[in-house]
Amino acid sequence: MSDPVLELDHVDAAYGPFRALFDINLRVGAGEAVALVGANGAGKSTIARVASGLLAPTAGAVLVDGTDLTGAPPFRFARAGIAHAPEGRSTFASLTVSENLQLAFRAARPRRDVAADLDEAFTLFPRLGERRDQVAGTLSGGEQRMLALARVLVLRPRLLIADELSLGLAPIVTAEVYRVLTQVRDAGTSLLVVEQHLDHALALAHRVVVLQQGEVTFDGGPDELGELSATVLLPAGAPSRAETAEAAETAETAETAEDPAGGEP
Amino acid sequence: MQLLEYAIRGVPTGCVFALLAVGLVLTYKTSGVFNLAFAGQAYVSAIVYYELRKELELPLVAAGVISILIVAPLIGLLLERVLFRYLRSAGSMAKLVTSLGLLIAIPEIAKLLFGSETRRNPPPLWWVRRTDEWLWPEGATFVLDAGQVATILSTVVVVIGLVVLFRATNLGLRMRAVVESPRLAELSGVDSERVSMAAWMLSSVLAGLAGVLVAPLFASLNPFDLFTLLVAALAATVFGGLTSIPLTFLGGILLGVLQAVLAGTLPTDSVLTNGLRPSLPFVVLFLLLLFRPGLRTTRELTDPLASVDAPPPPPAARARPPWIATSARVFGTVVSLIAVALCWFVLDSYWLGLAISGLVLSVTMMSLIVVVGMGGMLSLCQAALAAIGAFAMAQVVAGTGVPVVLGLVVGVVVAAAIGALLAIPVVRLDGVYLALATLAFALMFQSIFVPLSWVSGGAVPITVPRPVIGPLDLSDDRYFLVFVIVCAVATALVVIRLREGTTGRFLQALQTSDVAAASIGINGPRARVVAFTIAAGIAGFGGGLAAIDLGQASYEASFPYLIGLVWVALLVSAGARSIQAAVLSGLFFFLFPALLDKLFALPGNWVDTNPDAPSWVAGIADAIQPTWAQSVAFILFGIGAITYAKHPEGSIEAQTTASVNAIVRRVEARNDRHRVAAGAGGSAP
Amino acid sequence: MTAPLLSAVGVTKRYAGIVALQNVSLEVGPAEFAAVIGPNGAGKSTLFDCLTGVQRPDRGHVHFDGRPVDGLRPAARARAGMARTFQRIELFGGMSVLDHLLVADRARTRRGGLLTDVFTGSRPSSDELDRCSAVLELLGLQEWAERPAESLTLGRGRLVELARALMCEPKLLFLDEPSSGLDRHETDEMGDALLRVQSERGLAILLIEHDVPLVQRLAERMYVLDYGELIAAGPTDEVLADQKVRVAYLGAST
């Protein structure tokens, strides 16, 4: 088998004192679609962040196409062909819709035809075309999701990491997004999809990885999942070691925690 | 026609405003910092240019290149690397406080490096002295001098260059993206570190250019003249909404023209002219902030990926077990009592006087707790409000002969009333804008009202006697110390009660989520006006006490607005919500420079008393300048504010948390050992 | 039919040339559970903002509890009996769960001003604590009362928001995507909590939600927005069966 596009090798990760991932081994092969499922706080978003360089692992290694990128800044991951649409708001509120897209298209390697890329994005989401000169901060929540998606979909990366794609999207848009994802997959892009809606994820994925409390508890084909599927989405009853990590993950949505110290944790 | 000529005269000044204002906009757009230290950076380049031209007599181009294109960007790079890179995801308040600290520290560092002698007649950045022959037709009454030509040309080039940068280049787009979220920019494949460094270097070049160009406007180089000019230029920045470069340029020109027209048309020695002309930019700034549409609705940009950072630690108060809280309280009381006893029995009048002044200042610091720490409003005019309290008290006491203590009450009421009037329009403004509006108010107060005799008593400050309470004559410093302690404790109790009570909770709710607070029926503007008013009253109280302490209500001695900025930097870095921080920073402000002074005097004293002291000691004694103590103190005050970046809860709070954690860990370890020992003992037969 | 609790007539809102809401009218009766659905950018959140006073509509009127509230700011409308939660969760920093509830209770009863604070201190009274613990119990949050709200999971954070809103003793509760970001288990819990709240407190609820099964489970009546216009209104099952709604919102496959 050829080198996997992404390989997490015995990865631990933490937010400050809160450990979120424990000894994760995960490989995404070329052209493979992997669904990452589990309850809120199981560490799904944390894996996505480690895989795109946003969060440096505290132990273990991250390899992209066989190159060790552990601890490298996220833009090196992006240039290596990893595109990550993070959960929640992930657009520049102060830039217009087309500036948001241009920023990514111009930074992409190899050089691309930005005008054609913009056209493609606006064909994909006509709604964005109508608002191309509007500042992204004034878009509705769902429209911002579309914008974040348009950015990563059009780039046709080696690996696309999509975190909670359907969050806040109307059913009709969710269906459309998954139709596009299927196309992207069939065109040979590897996918790492984090998703609450199991049916969507399972229909798309070649392989399913189940996370519970920061550990991989299942790794196999969607059909092998069986009756596990009912239980994987249940959080642990007692407050667990993942609980605090979960809080760290949700701090994003809470937006109350501001850490002026900034920098890398 | 006459009017037109006046208007044209205003253009060069307008360009000076525009250049400074555009520089601020550039820094704000590319780094998210409303960089008050811009003036400090400008000052350093101006000094370097001065030294190169006048002392080393380098050619103009070489001096210009070194000071503007080499030294300035290196400073920018340094600031980015050691400081602002850690602040990228921080709120605008943290960034503003940091720049305040730099504003205080940078000029003093420059003084240490380059010497503090006066630098007269800064050289212009232009070859020829006069340009009337070729720029202005025969018989004209108006000439442009070299500095003006250079300023106009540079400003136009800079404005066009920046418009192109932001409208048409990839770098401009990247800078705007990195400001909002460096991480999201990285996900788009942008190297945020490099973009951020480039942004700081570019804006620092502009600061250097502005400093060198503007310096010849003044008779001698002085960082505070530069800063006052910068604040004047803020009106143009606000005119451009902090983002639009063309509008900022237009605003600067308009401001210069307006000033020139007023100067030409108003009668020359009316009160209005004398008061209004120098303060016009501050009045315009204040009015613009209140009435420019769109300012109130700007929401601070937040980094959507901020949660990748570790969550902030819980406050010490929550982490600390009750037994530590109790013992800390006992310990604190004992230390305070010992300190008071020391003051009473041991200290000579010099140190006692300083300790009293420090405690008096801590009352004013407590007003900052209410407005900054609890209200989340970075008020930069507490010194002005303190002055108002002092003036009101002094006027009432001098005019009507009421007892001084009653006069204090009048001072509090007047300061609170003016604070309330100021608060009603100002509290609607967001973070940075509120800080600017209060700064504008402080400068308006200084330039319009302080010179008036019905306010300050005119050139000679009004004297204020020490009160006599019953048998105690407070002109004895030791009795006065007790009086001040009583006042400070009473104020502290009020502040603590408010902080822990409903008022404090409402304000805290408003600080973290305005919309959520409104959704449960909290009237935000009203709560903020109340906080601002209380703070103004406390500041007035502190101001009145300061006047009693000094024996006169002197603006120059006690309340210049720059001193007020140092207070803010000090308190916020020590802990904006903590009484302990207020008291310590008040004492620190007076005692620390005095201690340094004594320290720096040691070698000299030793040489004086020991004629056979080694020569190197004498060398050290000679090298030490008398201004060093003040410089070093202010540098440390400024650097203190810079630590705010790492510890937004305040260094005292951070210290407490750290020591509480250490104690808890040690105690637990000991308990564990005991348990192990006990277990071992139990298992033995 | 009884008089509606909330009625909006002809609400219109434009931003920079784009019509966000076009002549939208809706009613919510006392103790009714209604929902607003619609594609992204259809104007649902703008509608909420206009109803709760965060934004002023360009045209149209809002009546609440028998009187016009057009001139009232959000805080005043909250005191008139409207409470809400937020799509992007909005908790108060540095406050425990109990603090959140106490603050809301104080804002409603207006107990404790400056003078009370300074002279008596403002410790929570037993009345206040009783009211808080009743709500905590209703939502199953007792265990977390002393925890800083920011440290809770998103699911519990949303429950805290709901609890805070309930402390205002509202007549009408606005919920903006309460299941957003929650997993299936947490969504079920949220649904249970909402049903419990409505049956015990007898208040009206207006809900924005994308989770169709959840809406079906909760709402009696529903409004559908598309491009700022109301395209359907009526009992939930009828609306969901409507052809126009299927095309605009659900998509053919659902």
Image (cartoon, helix red, strand yellow):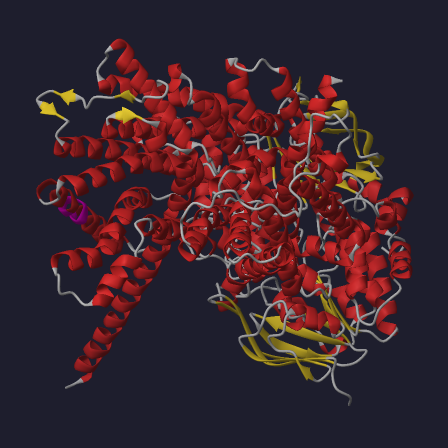
Q: Is residue C208 magenta?
A: no
Tell me the magenta residue range.
Answer: B334-338
User: In this rendering, would B444 be left or right of A88?
Assistant: left
Q: Is residue C207 above or below residue B651?
A: above
Q: Toward which corner of the image does residue A81 lie, by quadrant?
A: bottom right
Q: Residue at x 23, y 19 (%)?
A: B404
Q: Residue furthest bottom?
A: A1
Q: Main secondary structure of the magenta part?
A: helix
User: In this rendering, would B511 be left or right of B149?
Assistant: left
Quadrant containing the N terminus of chain B in the rendered view? top right
Instruction: Using the rendered image of the protein, determine whether residue B396 is visible from the camera's viewpoint.
Output: yes
Quadrant containing the C terminus of chain B in the rendered view? bottom left
Q: Position of residue B32 (x, y in %)?
A: 61, 49
Q: Position of residue B306 (x, y in %)?
A: 59, 57
User: In this rendering, would B23 be left or right of B220?
Assistant: right
Q: Residue at x 46, y 23 (%)?
A: B420
Q: Position of residue A247 (x, y in %)?
A: 53, 59
**Tally of numbered tags:** 0
Q: Is residue C16 above or below residue B577?
A: above
The answer to which of B53 and B35 lies nearer the viewer is B53
Q: Position of residue C102 (x, y in %)?
A: 44, 37
The answer to which of B395 and B181 lies nearer the viewer is B395
Instruction: Using the rendered image of the protein, determine whether residue B242 is visible from the camera's viewpoint.
Output: no
User: In this rendering, would C177 be left or right of B453?
Assistant: right
Q: Is residue B403 above or below residue A152?
A: above
The answer to which of C159 and B447 lies nearer the viewer is B447
Q: Is residue B335 magenta?
A: yes
